[in-house]
Amino acid sequence: MTEAVRLDQVYKAFVPSGRAAEPLLALEDVTLAAHPGEFIGLIGPSGCGKSTVLNLLAGLIRPSAGQVYHLGKPVRGINDRIGYITQDDNLLPWRSMRANVEFGLELRGVGKRERRERARELIELVGLSGFENHYPHELSGGMRKRASIVRTLVYDSPVVLMDEPFGPLDAQTRVILQDELLKLWDLRRPAVLFVTHDLVEAIALSDRILTFTGRPGRIKREHVVDLPRPRDVYRIHELDRFKELYDALWTDIREEIAAANEGVSS
Ligand SMILES: Nc1ncnc2c1ncn2[C@@H]1O[C@H](COP(=O)(O)OP(=O)(O)OP(=O)(O)O)[C@@H](O)[C@H]1O
Ligand SMILES: [Mg+2]
């Protein structure tokens, strides 16, 4: 079975602008893989290289050393076959919500009728029916997030990258969107790499969670989320196994915070 994605002993150094600036090592010897259909959570301190991992897979940057694969092939140049939901919603302000959702299909040459049909199904699933002709500035923050997620999932990429997609939303809307995301994901089950700072969210969504060390980012530990699906995101925190996983993740994070503080004081 071809892996969905793989990073093999990847290092990434950035050379900051400005003379005599030292290169900054963002990722150090990172090896990770996702199987088709697997939902993987990525957690780690700010600046540990989580977005860098996604940018490498999207082909926006190249590794300094090591290999990056998408569907078994090395990533060379911009990888427009991968779905990428960045932190900002990136909707086109001059297009209606429906036209935004259909945009990727349009670029891929899908005919109008099929576009409409595929968009309709997903728009309905996230409760945006009736808002098809609204422009992004006429939608709430949560609605824009829904539209941007649907816009990426509608073209059925086998691999989808999500970078803190629910970051700026209130706690209540986040949980509702997590529930909707799991339902959308379940339709075609793409492999997902999902970056979040929210431990509860990572457990609720993921099959596996990888924690990172502080910079330079290395994989610290793998946590298998062996909770049955479908999951009730509203009540998942009541499960005993949830509490164990939460404690294990929090231990990882605490160690990294302590290490960062030592670095500062020494
Ligand atoms: N294009 C770039 N040029 C220079 N440095 C960069 C670039 N992208 C990222 N970096 C640096 O690499 C490190 C990792 O950044 P990255 O955005 O991957 O972190 P992150 O784990 O996503 O953090 P956060 O949780 O805050 O989003 C940071 O120190 C950042 O300044
Ligand atoms: Mg980031």
Image (tube, helix red, strand yellow):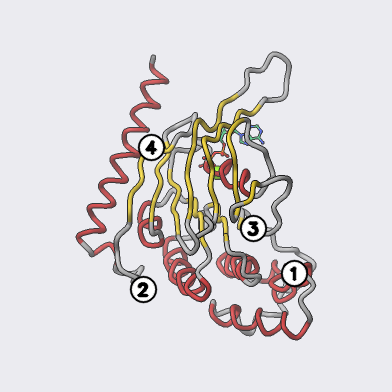
- Which badge, 1 or 4, comes first in the chain's sequence? 1
| Amino acid at pointer 1 | Phe
Identify the mark at residue 220; answer none if there is no mark.
Answer: 4
Q: Give the SS element for disc 2.
A: loop
* Residue occupying image coordinates x 49% and y 54%: 194
First along the sequence among labels 1 and 3? 3
Residue 20 figure quarter:
top right
User: Which residue occupies the foreground of this view, 170 or 187?
Assistant: 187
Q: Nearer the viewer, residue 254 or 217?
A: 217
Q: Which mark lies nearer to you, 2 or 1?
A: 2
**Badge 3 amino acid:** Ile
Residue 46 is labelled as: none
Real-space Cα separation, disc 1 to disc 4, in angstroms: 38 Å
Q: Which element is circle 4 on? A: strand
Q: Relative to 136, is 6 on the left or the right? A: left
Q: Which residue is mark 3?
A: 82
Residue at left offset 35%, top offset 39%:
253
**Residue linked to disc 2:** 230
Label 4 vs label 3: CA separation? 26 Å
Q: In this rendering, which labeled residue sits more in front, label 1 or label 4? A: 4
The image shows residue 265 at horizontal and vertical percentages of: 38, 17
